[in-house]
Amino acid sequence: MIKQQGCLSQQATQRFRAGDLLLRGFDNDEIMEILEVSLSSVKRWRKKIERHGLAALARKPGSGSEAELSPEQFDELKTILAKGALAAGYQTDRWTSRIVADLIYKTWNVTYCRSHVRRILNNFKMSYQKPSVKLTKHSQEVVDPWRKHDWKRIKKSG
């Protein structure tokens, strides 16, 4: 088995498990079944190992996409976020990932998906906040009798 050091992503762990299986003589179909991956992935990994050895399965430094915002812009974003969403012109003081993505787009014309915005907030030691949805016309006095009588009747007939 391959000895791994440090913390590896799930993808990296899977690539190295595949590499180990390839080196131990497993065929493509067996690896596909064991790791639940596509045939094209197994073939790609096999080719990399044959050409450059097991190390070729490691992620290359800088192989991700470039950051769209500069370090100065990230500092400015952090300052804006610290002042609150109301101060930035939003109707709530909660920073949701959608609102932060909108802020980034309006300020720097850069588009980030919500999942990446959550990572940015995490890097700032902040958390995005999921807004709770409350009905504005909600009346507990109306809901309780409906739930007690009508809902039971509807549920039984279904």
Image: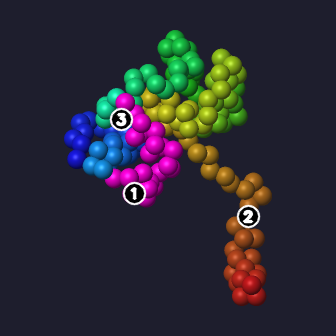
Q: x%, y% of residue 16?
A: 33, 42
Real-space CA distance between mark 1 and mark 3, rounded to the nearest whole angstrom: 18 Å
Name the residue nearer the viewer: 71 or 132. Answer: 71
How crowded pointer 3 is (Cα within 10 Å; few <14, some 14-19, many 20+) is rated as: few
Numbered label attached to residue 139: 2
Q: Which residue is drawn at 72% across and 56% down?
A: 135
Going from N to C along the chain, the mark reached first, 1 or 2, is 1
Q: x%, y% of residue 119?
A: 49, 33
Mark 3 belongs to which amino acid?
Glu
Q: Residue at x 78, y 58 (%)?
A: 137
Numbered label attached to residue 79: none
| Quarter of the rendering occupied by the C terminus | bottom right
Q: Do the residues labelled 1 and 2 touch (CB within 8 Å)?
A: no
Labels 3, 2: front one? 3
Labels 1, 2: front one? 1
Numbered label attached to residue 30: 1
Numbered label attached to residue 50: 3
SS at circle 3: helix
66 left or right of 158 in image: left
SS at circle 1: helix
Real-space CA distance between mark 1 and mark 2, rounded to the nearest whole angstrom: 59 Å
How crowded pointer 1 is (Cα within 10 Å; few <14, some 14-19, many 20+) is rated as: few
| Residue that extends furthest to the top in the rendered view of this protein | 72
Mark 1 belongs to which amino acid?
Glu
Q: Is residue 13 magenta?
A: no
Q: Residue at x 33, y 38 (%)?
A: 8
Q: Residue at x 58, y 45 (%)?
A: 130
Name the residue nearer the viewer: 158 or 17. Answer: 17
Q: Is residue 85 visible?
A: no
Name the residue nearer the viewer: 146 or 75. Answer: 75
User: What's drawn in magenta, residue-wise?
Assistant: 26-51
Going from N to C along the chain, the mark reached first, 1 or 3, is 1
